[in-house]
Image (spheres, helix red, strand yellow):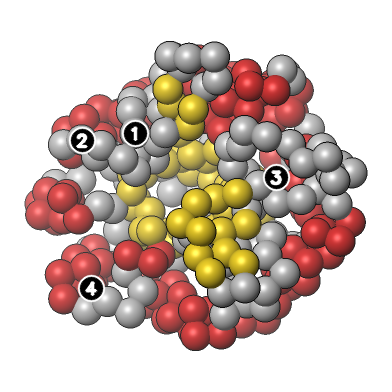
Amino acid sequence: MIEYLGIGVGLRRPHFHTVLENKKDVDWFELVSENFMGFGGRPRAVITELHRKKVPMVCHGLGLSLGSSDQLNHQYLAELKNLIEFVDAPWFSDHLCLSSAKEIQFHDLLPVLKTEESLNIIVNKINQLAKVIDHPFAFENISYYMESSHNTMSELEFIQELLKQTQSYMLLDINNVYVNAMNFGFDAKEFLKAIPAERVVQIHLAGHDDSGEVIIDTHGAQVPHPVWKLYQWYLEHTGKKISTLIEWDHNIPDYDTLNKQAKMAKEIINKVFS
C-alpha cells in the first residue's frame, strides 16, 4: 500500500533557500523530473539535503510521451531511474498525453487518441516502464480543448481501460477535470465517481483562467473556489486521504503564497477527516 504523504508543493528554483530553511505547512515536494535528471550543482545539492532530512519527494515528468508511437527513450529512462532511486520516490508520474513524435519534442501536452490502437501503445509502454523502474507509476489526466473525430472512447472510458489493463495508478488533476467538464459540458462529479478511488495515489490542485468563453488551464494562479469545492466533495465521496499537491508552474509566486495554498488544502483534509 502506498503511503499518504500529506500536502505538497512543487520544488522550484526560486524557493530552494526557503524550503531548506522552513517548509512550514508543506509535507513533501514534487520534482519536475527533467529539471533534476542528470543535473549536479545547486539542484542536486538541494534534493540531497532534503533527502538527508527525510523529506519525501515524488518525481513528475513531462517527457515519456505515452501517446506517441515512438519507442521509450532508453537514455531518458536511465536518467529518470537514477533520479527516482536517488530521492527514493514512493512513486513517479507523467502525463497521459502526446508530447513528442519522431523524436521531436512539442514542448506541450497534447491529448492522446482514444482508440484501441492508442490504448495498446500506452499499455505496452506502461508495462515496459514497470520492467525498468521498480517504483509505482501514475499517469495524470490532462486538460484539452478539442476532441478528435477518430476517437472511439471517451476520456473516462479510456482511463478506465488503462487502469484495468495495467498495474499503474492515477495522478488525478481535479483542476483539469473541472476545466474539461466546463468546456465540454459533462458532469465533473460523475466523472470523478467513475474512477476507482483505490487507484488514485495523488491529487493535483491548480489555477486556471475563466475570463473568456473557454476556461484555460494555466497552472499559474491560486486554486479557485470551484476547484476547492470539487476537491472537498471528492474527499468526502471517497472517504480517503490522498496525497495532494498545489501545482503552480507559471508566474511562480513567493513561497509564502504557495504555503498558504498548502495550508488551505490541509484545512480541508482536517475538516473532512476530523
* Quarter of the figure with residue 195: top right
Question: Does 234 appear above or below 85?
Answer: above
Quick check: can you spot residue 211?
Answer: yes
Q: CA distance from mark 2 to mark 1?
A: 9 Å
- The residue under label 1 is 220
Rendered location of residue 224, percent (x, y) = 41, 19
Residue at 48% across, 43% down: 243
Q: State left or right for residue 95 relative to residue 211.
A: right
- The residue under label 2 is 253
- The residue under label 4 is 44
Quick check: can you spot residue 239?
Answer: no
Q: How many marks?
A: 4
- In this orientation, which residue lies closer to the viewer: 100 or 2? 100
Q: Secondary structure at mark 4?
A: helix
Q: CA distance from mark 4 to mark 1?
A: 26 Å
Q: CA distance from mark 4 to mark 3?
A: 33 Å
